[in-house]
């Protein structure tokens, strides 16, 4: 990462954010506020449709909120969107890779769009391949890679620009335990190097293992926030999953 | 907005990405390069054959003279002397009309002409009766029978029939004059006057009437330019291929939208305009390559196939302007398709169907002037028609860019409208 994050300094500040999609019956986010410090590993949990992806999309500048304030490393997401994008990285929930390209060609293309070139780009590609344990597979077409390899490549494609803030939207969905373990290890390594990480997941064990703090989102609002251990202590629940179900209910969220 | 200095390498990266995706897509390469190349060769060869069937080439005719008299000889001379026939004369002692019919039916020759036995004697007798007594009802002779290949087209039949009628009228006229001359001399002799008594114009009446004094000058409006299937088909099928670039454009957009790629691209510090420019520039490059391929085939392969070589005209660079305008229109349509469709299957079905329909309406497959009036009016809505008109102005009529400004503007406007519609749809 570019620089060691300085604890105590604000990386992400969101205040009273509201977002309603055209045609939606209720807002995807309502009165959503968040405060994440530099170097923090923050987990965003919530049932399907709770607003996690919308929150991540607004925080990394994909689209603006209807109202409210969002600042990333002190920069306004709406008016300084490109600067925000330059210092952040997003790993989307769906695989964001060209299947017809090789592993290296994917990284080279996204690296060039980050404005990298020459030796610096090659160094970043090598670093990413190493991090994802794909150094021996650089010339392999993505469509011939396993699910785990694709997930690892999907992750490192978001690290090409050495982001200060990394947004990860369920990056370990549907992969084997080995690949998930590798991704966890590398994310903790990045955190140690100073990166601020926003991580959405449905896996409670992941959140317990990785996150300094978590926020539970439901119906577009942050209903609980704090270190996982502290949240459990404050409640009468004996596990994060029990707390989650207590806060968000047992009703299925299919729509 | 990004500065040009930072945007330029990103545009190049986007161009390289599009070209690499296309290079790895064999089906798309087949559709963009092999399909128009095959179509232009096959259809030009077929249309050369149609020229033969419609009489634009020499008509292969069998000639069987069962008369052996003046009618047969004169008709053979009249047909062999012109440019329209490649005459094969059969020997009436060895071949009969049935065999001639079989040979024509087999397609070996397009026309069979039979001068019936006794035709000269019957003509002489008829004209003699006509001149001497001018009966109320004139008997009509049919001294010649024409047999056509069942596959020959109406235009060829009409041309051959007209030519034969003209030749027969000349023969009949000559015969009437000969009889008149003979009767005149006989009348003078009966009166005891020498033949020199007839005043000069009447003594050489036969020669005067036979000598042509009117002729028809028929030529193409601009004789400098060629108009044949090669000059029509090379730009037409290149244009067809160019519009098929809309399919890979749409497919890449769908691929990016239906995976997480679009979200990743939106999360990068790069303007959507940069990615859009890269996509359009890459496919305009593809369009130029397509046209080059088809033009080179026309210039260097066609002569080996017995076809005339394609002539790129006096200002080949003007063609580049049309290619770029057509490429823009095709890319715009591809972007629109990629936005409207929700799956690769939809784009793969809707894209080719609409392009083939627009090509048919626009005159790519059949020239617009051969269409019914309603279709001729509809043809002006097809972007392929605008592109084809532009090529024809440059290649067939020898005009410059000034003459095609309207069509170029229409193509550019089509690009703008489709892109704006796509942008509006993408936002909703």
Image (cartoon, helix red, strand yellow):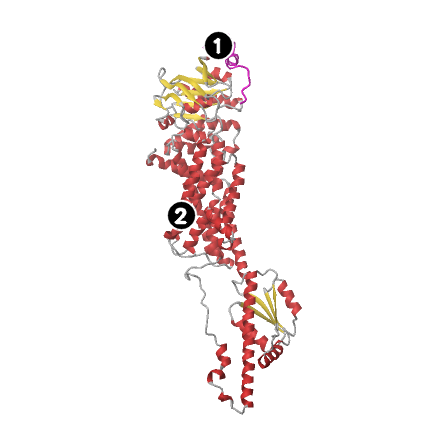
Q: Position of residue B154 (x, y in %)?
A: 57, 61
Query: Which residue carries the number 2 mark?
Result: B408
Is A247 colored magenta in this rendering? yes
Instruction: List the single residue furthest toward the bottom.
Output: B192
Residue B92 falls in which quadrant of the image? bottom right
Q: Is residue B299 visible?
A: yes
Q: Is residue B244 above or below residue B162?
A: above
Decide: is B318 above or below A23: below
What is the CA distance from the residue labelled 2 to the residue labelled 1? 70 Å
Comparing marks 2 and 1, which lies closer to the viewer? 2
Highlighted magenta segment, given as a residue range: A229-255
| In-image side of B306 versus B408 (left or right) | right
Residue at image coords 44%, 64% = B219
Q: Chain of mark 2?
A: B
Residue B236 in the image: state x and y as whole percent.
47, 51
Q: Nearest the camera: A75 or B362? A: B362
On the image, the x and y values in percent for residue B133 come to 59, 80
Q: Mark 1 highlights which residue?
A: A232
Count numbered badges in the picture.
2
Q: Chain of mark 1?
A: A
Asked if badges 2 and 1 are on one and the same chain, I answer no
């Amino acid at each position: 990462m570019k620089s060691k994050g300085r604890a105590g300094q604000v990386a992400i500040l969101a205040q009273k954010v509201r977002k309603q999609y055209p045609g939606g019956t209720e807002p995807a986010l309502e009165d959503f506020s968040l405060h994440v410090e530099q170097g923090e590993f923050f987990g965003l949990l919530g049932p399907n449709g709770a607003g996690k992806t919308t929150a991540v999309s607004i925080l990394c500048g994909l689209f603006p909120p209807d109202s409210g304030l969002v600042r990333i490393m002190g920069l306004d997401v709406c008016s300084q969107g490109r600067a925000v994008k330059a210092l952040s990285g997003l790993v989307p929930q769906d695989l964001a890779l060209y299947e017809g390209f090789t592993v290296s060609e994917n990284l080279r293309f996204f690296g060039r769009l980050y404005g990298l070139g020459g030796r610096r780009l090659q160094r970043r590609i090598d670093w990413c391949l190493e991090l994802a344990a794909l150094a021996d597979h650089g010339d392999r077409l993505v469509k011939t890679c396993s699910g785990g390899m694709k997930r690892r490549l999907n992750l490192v494609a978001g690290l090409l620009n050495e982001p200060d803030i990394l947004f990860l939207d369920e990056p370990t969905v549907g992969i084997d335990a080995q690949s998930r373990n590798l991704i966890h290890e590398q994310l903790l390594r990045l955190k140690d190097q100073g990166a601020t990480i926003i991580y959405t997941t449905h896996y409670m064990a992941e959140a317990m293992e990785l996150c300094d703090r978590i926020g539970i989102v439901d119906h577009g609002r942050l209903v609980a926030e704090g270190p996982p251990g502290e949240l459990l202590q404050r409640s009468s629940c004996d596990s994060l999953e029990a707390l989650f179900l207590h806060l968000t209910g047992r009703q299925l969220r299919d729509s | 907005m990004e500065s040009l200095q930072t945007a330029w390498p990103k545009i190049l990266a986007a161009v390289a990405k599009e070209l690499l995706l296309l290079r790895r897509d064999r089906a798309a390469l087949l559709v963009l390069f092999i399909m128009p190349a095959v179509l232009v060769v096959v259809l030009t060869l077929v249309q050369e054959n149609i020229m033969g069937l419609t009489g634009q080439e020499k008509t292969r005719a069998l000639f069987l003279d069962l008369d052996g008299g003046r009618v047969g000889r004169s008709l053979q001379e009249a047909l062999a002397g012109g440019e329209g026939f490649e005459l094969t004369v059969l020997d009436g002692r060895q071949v009969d009309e049935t065999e001639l019919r079989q040979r024509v039916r087999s397609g070996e020759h397009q026309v069979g002409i039979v001068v019936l036995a006794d035709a000269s004697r019957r003509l002489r007798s008829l004209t003699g009766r006509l001149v001497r007594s001018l009966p109320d009802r004139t008997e009509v002779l049919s001294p010649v029978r024409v047999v056509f290949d069942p596959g020959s087209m109406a235009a060829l039949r009409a041309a051959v029939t007209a030519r034969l009628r003209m030749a027969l009228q000349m023969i009949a006229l000559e015969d009437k004059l000969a009889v008149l001359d003979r009767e005149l001399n006989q009348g003078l002799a009966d009166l005891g006057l020498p033949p020199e008594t007839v005043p000069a114009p009447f003594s050489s009446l036969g020669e005067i009437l036979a000598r042509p004094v009117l002729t028809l000058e028929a030529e193409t409006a601009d004789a400098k330019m060629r108009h044949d299937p090669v000059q029509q088909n090379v730009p037409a099928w290149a244009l067809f291929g160019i519009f098929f670039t809309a399919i890979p454009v749409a497919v890449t957009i769908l691929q990016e939208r239906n995976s997480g790629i679009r979200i990743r691209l939106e999360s990068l510090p790069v303007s959507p305009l940069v990615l859009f420019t890269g996509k359009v520039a890459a496919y305009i490059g593809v369009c130029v390559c397509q046209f080059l391929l088809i033009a080179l085939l026309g210039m260097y392969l066609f002569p080996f196939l017995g076809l005339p070589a394609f002539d790129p005209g006096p200002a080949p660079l003007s063609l580049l302007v049309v290619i770029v305008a057509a490429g823009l229109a095709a890319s715009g349509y591809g972007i629109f398709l990629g936005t409207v469709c929700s799956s690769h299957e939809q784009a793969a079905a809707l894209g080719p169907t609409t392009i083939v329909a627009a090509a048919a309406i626009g005159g790519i497959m059949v020239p617009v002037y051969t269409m019914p009036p309603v279709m001729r009016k509809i043809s002006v809505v097809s972007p392929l028609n605008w592109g084809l008109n532009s090529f024809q102005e440059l290649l067939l009529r020898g005009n410059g860019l000034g003459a095609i400004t309207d069509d170029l503007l229409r193509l550019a406007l089509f690009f703008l409208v489709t892109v704006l519609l796509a942008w509006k749809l993408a936002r909703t």
